[in-house]
C-alpha cells in the first residue's frame, strides 16, 4: 500500500461519517440508519458507486432536511468525500464502504426513499452485463430496499449502457419511466440541480450528451 493510500484509509478509520468494516455500526446499522447515525426520521437517499461523493455532497447541500449516503468500495475515494463533507459541516451525509452486491446487508426492506446511480462503469463487454448496476439482479435489490413509490435515477454518458438500462427497466416493470438522451437540453434537467461530477464535466466539455432516466421502483406491480 502506498503512503498516500495509507493516509486515506487512516482518515476513514478516524472519520465518524464513514461506516466500514471494523467499526461497531458496520454490523448493526441495518434498519437503524435514522436512529443510530442520523438521529432523525428524515428520508434517506443513496448514491451508488459514489466515488469521491461529489453528487452525494451536492445533493446534501441542496436538501439539508434529507439524509444522504454515498456507497463505494474504494476507500481512497470515500476518504475525499468524507473530508469535504466534514469541512462543509454537513451532518446529513454518511459514506458506506462496501460492495454494492451486499446492499441488503446494510439496509432493511423499505428503508430507502431514493437511489441515484451516477456514471457507473458501463461494463461494455457482453459477458460483463451481470455487473452493470441496472442488471435485473440489482434492480430487484433496489426495489426491495426502496419505499413503495421510491425513485431510482440513472445518469451516464454511455449510450450503450443507457439503451441496455432502458430495456431492462421496461422488462422489469418499473412505473412512470421518464428519460432523455440529452439531459441539458431536456425539461428533466431541473431534477439534477446542475450538479456535475468531475468526470461528467469532462464529458460535457468534450461535447458528449448526458443520458438520464428516472422511474418509480419501490412499488407492488
Image (cartoon, rainbow, N blue to C red):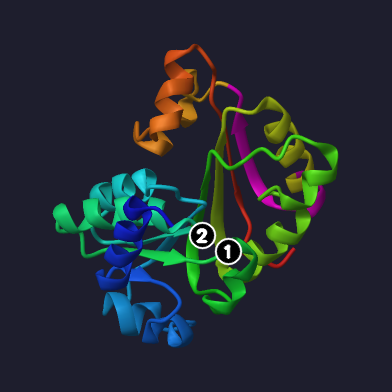
For label 1, the residue is 99
- Whether 163 is drawn above or below 80: the answer is above
Counting from the top left corner in percent of width and height, residue 192 is at 41, 37
Name the residue located 29 percent from the left edge and 74 percent from the top edge: 38
Counting from the top left corner in percent of width and height, residue 167 is at 79, 40
Q: Are marks 2 and 1 in contact (CB under 8 Å)?
A: yes
Quarter of the image for residue 166 reads top right
Magenta run includes residue 179:
yes
Name the residue located 25 percent from the left edge and 61 percent from the top edge: 65
- Whether 175 is drawn above or below 98: the answer is above
Name the residue located 76 percent from the left edge and 37 percent from the top edge: 164
Q: Is residue 219 visible?
A: no
Quadrant of image for the N terminus: bottom left
Left/right of residue 91 with respect to residue 138 in the rendered view: left
Q: Which residues are magenta?
A: 170-181
For label 2, the residue is 73
Q: How many marks?
A: 2
In front here: 221 or 91? 91
Left/right of residue 88 with respect to residue 178 in the rendered view: left
Q: Earlier in the sequence, mark 2 or mark 1?
A: 2
Counting from the top left corner in percent of width and height, residue 4 is at 32, 51
- What label sits on residue 90 in the rendered view? none
Magenta run includes residue 2:
no
- In space, the residues marked 2 and 1 are separated at their CA atoms by 5 Å
Amino acid at each position: 500500500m502506498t503512503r498516500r493510500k495509507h493516509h486515506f484509509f487512516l482518515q476513514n478509520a478516524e472519520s465518524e461519517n464513514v461506516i466500514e468494516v471494523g467499526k461497531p455500526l458496520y454490523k448493526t446499522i441495518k434498519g437503524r440508519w435514522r436512529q443510530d447515525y442520523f438521529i432523525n426520521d428524515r428520508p434517506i437517499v443513496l448514491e451508488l458507486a459514489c466515488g469521491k461523493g461529489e453528487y452525494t455532497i451536492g445533493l446534501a447541500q441542496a436538501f439539508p432536511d434529507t439524509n444522504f449516503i454515498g456507497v463505494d468500495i474504494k476507500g481512497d475515494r470515500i476518504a475525499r468525500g468524507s473530508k469535504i463533507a466534514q469541512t462543509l459541516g454537513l451532518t446529513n451525509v454518511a459514506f458506506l464502504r462496501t460492495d454494492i452486491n451486499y446492499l441488503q446487508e446494510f439496509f432493511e426492506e423499505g428503508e430507502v426513499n431514493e437511489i441515484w446511480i451516477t456514471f457507473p462503469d458501463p461494463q461494455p463487454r457482453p459477458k460483463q452485463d451481470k455487473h452493470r448496476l441496472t442488471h435485473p439482479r440489482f434492480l430487484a435489490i433496489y426495489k426491495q430496499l426502496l419505499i413503495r413509490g421510491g425513485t431510482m435515477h440513472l445518469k451516464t454518458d454511455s449510450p450503450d449502457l443507457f439503451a441496455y438500462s432502458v430495456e431492462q427497466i421496461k422488462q422489469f416493470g418499473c412505473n412512470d419511466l421518464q428519460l432523455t438522451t440529452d439531459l441539458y437540453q431536456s425539461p428533466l434537467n431541473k431534477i439534477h440541480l446542475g450538479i456535475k461530477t468531475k468526470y461528467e464535466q469532462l464529458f460535457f466539455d468534450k461535447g458528449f450528451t448526458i443520458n438520464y432516466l428516472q422511474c418509480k421502483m419501490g412499488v407492488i406491480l
